[in-house]
Amino acid sequence: MKTILKFKHPKEDDKFLQAFHASAWVAVCQEFDEKLRKWIKYNNDFKTPEEALQAARDYQTEILKSHNLTLFS
């Protein structure tokens, strides 16, 4: 099977960049889900919900950087 995606200006088009980096986004989601699963399944040191959420945000930022992705352009 062969698929061709056509874009007018690939380097400036957000849709092109989303399609081009789709596999990296899938990897980020899988890594993030695995980390959350481990935090839920095994003991963690979070004392408050806010602390747990901040840890999740920090981890999200870390894995996005490791895949050269950002949430905001």
Image (spheres, helix red, strand yellow):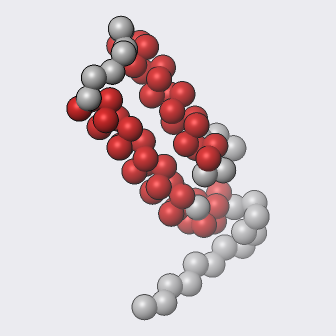
Q: Is residue 22 above or below residue 47?
A: below
Image quadrant where one finds the C terminus:
top right
Picture quadrant of residue 34: top left
Q: Is residue 15 something one can see in this rendering?
A: no
Residue at 51% from the left image edge and 33% from the top image edge? 59
Q: Residue furthest top?
A: 47
Q: Position of residue 3 (x, y in %)?
A: 50, 85
Residue in the foreground of this view, choosing between 41 and 63:
41
48 or 73, nearer to the observer: 48
Residue 25 visible? The answer is: yes
Quarter holding residue 41: top left
- Image position of 69 (left or right of 55): right
* Relative side of 36 to 22, left or right: left
Pinpoint residue 24: horizontal percent, then vertical percent: 54, 58
Q: How many marks?
A: 0
Q: Position of residue 42 (x, y in %)?
A: 26, 29
Q: Is residue 65 above or below residue 21?
A: above
Residue at horizontal 37 percent and vertical 14 percent from the top: 46
Figure check: 52 above or below 67:
above
Q: Quarter of the image containing the N terminus?
A: bottom left
Q: Is residue 2 above or below residue 54?
A: below
Foreground: 51 or 11? 51
* Residue that appears at 36% across and 9% down: 48
Quick one: which residue is furthest to the left in this view? Answer: 41
Q: Position of residue 22 (x, y in %)?
A: 52, 62
Q: Would residue 62 be found to the left or right of residue 12 on screen?
A: left
Write down the quadrant of residue 7 in the picture: bottom right
Q: Which residue is depicted at the point 47% across and 55% down?
A: 27
